[in-house]
Amino acid sequence: MNNRDVQAAWKYHNDTKHSLWSIRNNPHYLDFTNRPLPFKIYPAIKPFPLPRDVSQTEVAALSAIAEPAHLSRTETIPDLQDLARIFYFSAGITKQRTYPGGEIYFRAAACTGALYEIELYLVTRDLPGLDAGVYHFNPADVSLRLLRKGDFRGNLGQATAMEPAVAHAPATIISTGTYWRNAWKYRARTYRHFGWDNGTLLANMLAVAAASGLPAKIVLGFVDAEVNRLLDLDRRREVSLCLVPVGCTTKSSLPTPRDAPVLGLETIPLSQHEVEYPAMLQMHDASSLDTQEQVRQWRATGPVDTSSASAREEIRLQPLPEEEQPKDTIEQVILRRGSTRTFDKTASITLPQLSTILECAPGGLPADFLEPPGAQLNDLYLIVHSVEGLKPGAYFFRRDRNTLEVLKTGEFRAEAYHLGLAQELPADACVAIFFLADLERILDRYGNRGYRAVQLEAGAIGGRMYLAAYAQRLGSTGLTFFDDDVTQFFSPHAKGKSAIFLVAVGRPLKRKAP
Ligand SMILES: Cc1cc2nc3c(=O)[nH]c(=O)nc-3n(C[C@H](O)[C@H](O)[C@H](O)COP(=O)(O)O)c2cc1C
């Protein structure tokens, strides 16, 4: 299939839209007896435990989110403590709860359905305390498992057509998505979830890397088959989604690519039986890059800028001044983060609190599809219910001017309830932030792979919103939505755009003591 044949992305997107009709006519019952395992387990490989008593970075969450460390000229080599910190605070288990259906191990980053379909791998040279190799990270025992011994970074250099951050990285983390683990509940819509759930995890990873003084960047341009082969993935079940080079060596000294034969390593089956959703395999194939030349061309495409001139009233953002910003560290904030289950609909937040979220979450995501830095694929539209300093209504966030453009004023809690898939959360929050994108222009520039990019960016910005909200002791949750109704609500301004994601921010309802 061809990345430029963008009918594939349109077909997948249109076929996986939620509408009142699709929900009523296509119900899905969860088979709890066939619920997938939340971990990938290699029973025959000895674990290499990561240190658990890792030093704290002491860096305030808000600055860790807002200031990712860029590719520097100085030598920054992660050690085992850094890697343990990055893995744990991106994908580690932070809470455990018992439900009638069994135990749920909640992780550092939010994930649709708490199904945790994103796996992490590491490709590294020799580091202090760790031998060169290809490893899998298992959050269940906070351990690495060696899949291939030796320095395979040259294979990643080749697969990314020598992307500069990969070429200079002593270590690269790779995210993969396991279809069935999420499709058990969400069926073919899981391919969108790959982007969202990988994105929330990356928001944590980039912030913790920055707090550790290590440059890190999202790399989406790579030859899919080469990376899948290196990780020994069965591509009908699990696929590579993105690379995150971590750290920097002053000169590019990648070894030549090595032979990576099929390993066929044993893993514990996720369920008694799995269901395959061909729409997702087709979407993945259609957005795959097959050669280094395709990668090079893909990376050379310029950014998409969708902001337009406006004659509407605009309200300037008023972020909290530096000295008034909460100073809780990134680790503290990640540990207390969770998705708010009930918002207090009588509560409000302030314009400076909202401004702080909007100022530090969207901008400056380091990614190969966002060059020059500052470019963005998703546009943010807000339904404000109760923000002191703003009239209730619908707004468009003009990131080029740091303003909120008034689209219409009025109480829209009932509309937010409906748009957020008839859930109370977006109605009871103080603000519901919708992500919409001009898919036409994005697919035109990036081909089908632009679809991966726009979902991933939404998840990463959404993940940063979670962190920026929890840093300010507010609550937040990611949400799903009725696609076309969202566009319609924000039209004519949003005409032609597609709904990509939704985040609600507010104050969690404090439960009264019994
Ligand atoms: C992309 C995304 C979409 C989500 N959609 C919903 C939703 O529609 N309704 C809901 O109640 N929770 C939703 N959640 C919250 C998840 O259920 C929650 O992240 C998961 O149960 C893990 O819990 P935690 O975030 O508290 O760690 C969503 C989370 C993400 C990341």
Image: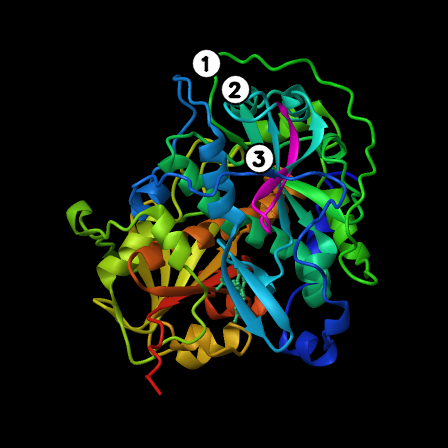
Residue type beneath disc 1: Thr
Labels 2 and 1: the sequence-earlier one: 2
Side (left or right) of 89 relative to 33: left
Q: Which residues are magenta?
A: 132-144
Quarter of the image for residue 64 reads top left
Query: Are the residues at dot 2 and dot 1 in contact (C-beta closer than 8 Å)?
Result: yes
Side (left or right) of 226 relative to 377: right
Q: Is residue 433 visible?
A: yes
Q: Is residue 15 visible?
A: no
For label 2, the SS is loop
- The image shows residue 49 at horizontal and vertical percentages of 57, 39
- Compute the Cα span from label 3 to label 2: 14 Å
Residue pointed to by mark 2: 168
Q: Is residue 143 magenta?
A: yes
Q: Nearer the viewer, mark 3 or mark 2?
A: 3
Side (left or right) of 445 relative to 351: right
- The image shows residue 318 at horizontal and vertical percentages of 21, 54
Determine which of the numbered discs, if any, sits on residue 173 in the image. 3
Residue type beneath disc 2: His
Q: Is residue 257 magenta?
A: no
Q: Is mark 2 within 8 Å of ligand 1?
A: no
Residue pointed to by mark 1: 250
- The image shows residue 289 at horizontal and vertical percentages of 71, 34
